[in-house]
Image: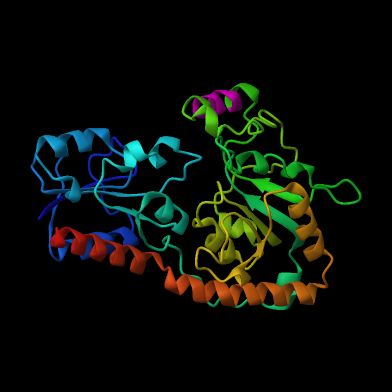
Amino acid sequence: MRIKVIGHTPDQDFFTATSKPWSMFFRALKQKHEIVTSKIGVSKFDCLVVNSHSPKALKLALKLGIPKSKILMIYWEPSVSYPKLHTKKIRNQYGKVYTPSKYWSNELGGTYFNWPQVLIKDKYVNFKNWQARKNKTVMILANKFSAKRDQNYSLRRKTWKIKDRDGNFVVDLFGAYWNKGFFYDFRHFFGMLTRTRLSDWDFYSWIYLGKKQKNYLGTSSNKKVTAEDYRINLVIENCAEYVSEKLFEAHLSQNIVIYVGANLAKEGINPGIAIEVSPKIRAIKDAIRQIQYLHPKDQYKLMKKQQAIARRESKKRFNEKVLANLAKTISKDLSQE
């Protein structure tokens, strides 16, 4: 069959393999099918696979008479950043959907697959060098906006409140779109507000819009290198619906990881990979303080323990293997229709 693959944005006519993991996806798909690479409307196709809802591609597929069973979507975005994507109206326009979140699979009736992750390798860092790191916490995340209930973006904007007994900031903040001013923040927040149903509004999501983050140290050109100056890494997911790449990428720097996000055990991940805390500033502060007050050798042991678990878990979720298997699942599902 001829398959048209649409990228992660609705206007992306054709999704090309720009990385090795995605090249493995297309290699597996090509074993039994032909990939249509021309622009939408130029060549006919028999099946449509989208990485995000694409009204343009969907309209053409229906015009070509492609049955719903051969119109498939892979979900990547959480409801807090793309509320409409998780509605029945959008979901029901596709035959099968594939989701890298068990929460989404239950919500949408999708086929589950692991979120593609980097492979954590056994990189040795000796205690002397690790002890020389700052006994502080780093957070490398973008300032984003959502008005939907259960978003964690506003929690990221509260981390400046975490201070030690001398009033010093405990969390050093890096990332994009911070300290842009109130009008920048409000404009992007208002855009999300208008795309969110009133019944789903989080009336506290506007907190600290435009707030100057005094613990902000700029963007990071290399997150791994930046985090290697610290002993602790704070990861706050967009929401608690899924486990993204953020958790595993934090382990590339041999940090002790504090995690705010999905329930790891429910997502099939060994919870020993990180210290899980609730999405509350007080809980985050207490977790950081407990780690900071440990003897450096105990901190080092905790890091090594998390690292060992992260290596095992990353092997199960290695991006090249995950995307190749996803393509095989899609190919099999299409062949059975």
On-image quarter of the C terminus:
bottom left
Determine the image quadrant of residue 17: bottom left
Q: Is residue 188 magenta?
A: yes
- Residue at 71% x, 77% y is 301
Percent x, y of residue 161:
79, 42
Q: Is residue 164 above or below residue 84?
A: below
Whether residue 233 sits left or right of residue 31 in the image: it is right
- Residue at 75% x, 38% y is 214
Question: Magenta segment, which residues?
Answer: 185-192
- Type of secondary structure dominating the magenta stretch: helix
Determine the image quadrant of residue 222: bottom right
On-image quarter of the N terminus:
bottom left
Question: Is residue 41 visible from the viewing direction of this image?
Answer: no
Question: Is residue 274 visible from the viewing direction of this image?
Answer: yes
Q: Is residue 225 above or below residue 150?
A: below
Percent x, y of residue 234:
66, 55
Percent x, y of residue 223:
57, 54
